[in-house]
Amino acid sequence: MRASQQDFENALNQVKLLKKDPGNEVKLRLYALYKQATDGPCNMPKPGMLDFVNKAKWDAWNALGSLPKETARQNYVDLVSSLSSSSEAPSQGKRGADEKARESKDILVTSEDGITKITFNRPTKKNAITSQMYRDIILALKNASTDNTVMAVFTGTGDYYCSGNDLTNFTSATGGIEEAASNGAVLLRDFVNSFIDFPKPLVAVVNGPAVGISVTLLGLFDGVFASDRATFHTPFSQLGQSPEACSSYTFPKMMGSAKAAEMLLFGKKLTAREAWAQGLVTEVFPENTFETEVWTRLKTYAKLPPNAMRISKELIRKNEKEKLYAVNAEECTTLQARWLSEECMNAIMSFVSRKSKL
Ligand SMILES: CCCC/C=C/CC(=O)SCCNC(=O)CCNC(=O)[C@H](O)C(C)(C)COP(=O)(O)OP(=O)(O)OC[C@H]1O[C@@H](n2cnc3c(N)ncnc32)[C@H](O)[C@@H]1OP(=O)(O)O
């Protein structure tokens, strides 16, 4: 039976109402995550144009691409718990593209203009990342992967982008050093996996010097915009450590083995322009116009069709994912052993006691 013009208009109105109700969006997200967690990637035949309800379900499920079942299950649990906590605290209001999502002390998370902005906010320590900050970032990325923002952007408060791992994470840990190294390896693996799995465009706005893990992670980003004041430094050998965040794979692939070795083995610090020449940075901007130019650009990108961007990212990343998980796991095992080595302990003690600075 052919749909009349009236049927068609009724259906269009129904869709407008469906779209206006944020509850439906949440229901669709729950549906998609549940299907992904139980059945894996979307195996539902594409519904017809006028089958609006199933089309919305298909779109939501299909947009998850090849998100691993484990991650989908975790996202489902997180979404349900965030819903139950928001119903316990109705005064907090709904999360949306133009509202502040949540705040922790050292990691700020805000959502505006379709962009989730995640800010390293510990300027007195050059934005060094504590264990709690790793956990806050994992959570922020999980939330941003299923909320209604279009992309996520990392930046730093103050003169630094980030000085990497807080070198006192190990010296201040309670319990033995072996336990600290083992916990650190698990945290690092989960942290890096959350970048590998992030389904939307991920951009770094590198406002100043970047050190260690804040540099290596950039190999998993889709865009890196740097101020000409930024530098890129991975002093792993100096610290008795080894590369992480899949950089032992992404850096040689990106810049060739000689240049990767210069950074990862010999700890050469690159200027923003050198990092651009090696393909680590997308574009370098003069410091005095950096913020204005970059944010104007990002707001334009955030208006692009979100599903197209997710699907394209999925295509780009798809064939690499298993490799990235494996590299991440191996790097974490190697680092766990490095953290227990004399070379590493001496380097950390030397930093903590300020006998020398890198
Ligand atoms: C569990 C997951 C593990 C993942 C592993 C990742 C590996 C890495 O990320 S390795 C890279 C580690 N980072 C570093 O080696 C950088 C160490 N910091 C420095 O070399 C210098 O502080 C600096 C070059 C970043 C800045 O030097 P500057 O002279 O301008 O300032 P400072 O007076 O040194 O710093 C101010 C303040 O900040 C503290 N701080 C800076 N960076 C760190 C850090 N990474 N960890 C801990 N604390 C840091 C510094 O101690 C100062 O604190 P005080 O004012 O309290 O002395």
Image: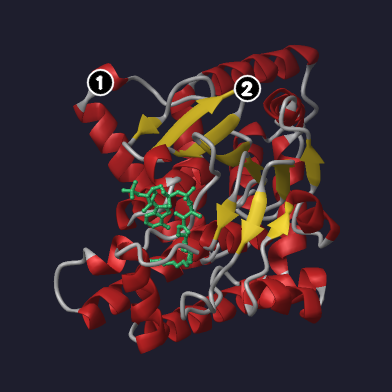
Res 325 quadrant in image:
bottom right
Of callouts 1 and 2, the N-terminal one = 2
Which residue is depicted at the point 21% across and 66% down? 173
Which residue is depicted at the point 31% across and 72% down? 349
Say which amino acid is labelled 1: Pro
Position of residue 58 measured from the top left corner of the image (x, y, whole percent): 63, 46
166 left or right of 213 in image: left
C-beta proximity under 8 Å, tags 1 and 2: no
Quarter of image, ligand 1:
bottom left
> Label 1: which residue?
90
Q: Is residue 38 visible?
A: no
Which residue is depicted at the point 31% across and 77% down? 181
Position of residue 118 measured from the top left corner of the image (x, y, whole percent): 50, 39
Residue placed furthest toward the right: 277
Real-space Cα separation, disc 1 to disc 2, in angstroms: 27 Å
The dot on residue 15 is 2
The dot on residue 357 is none
Label 2 packing within 10 angstroms: few (<14), some (14-19), many (20+): some
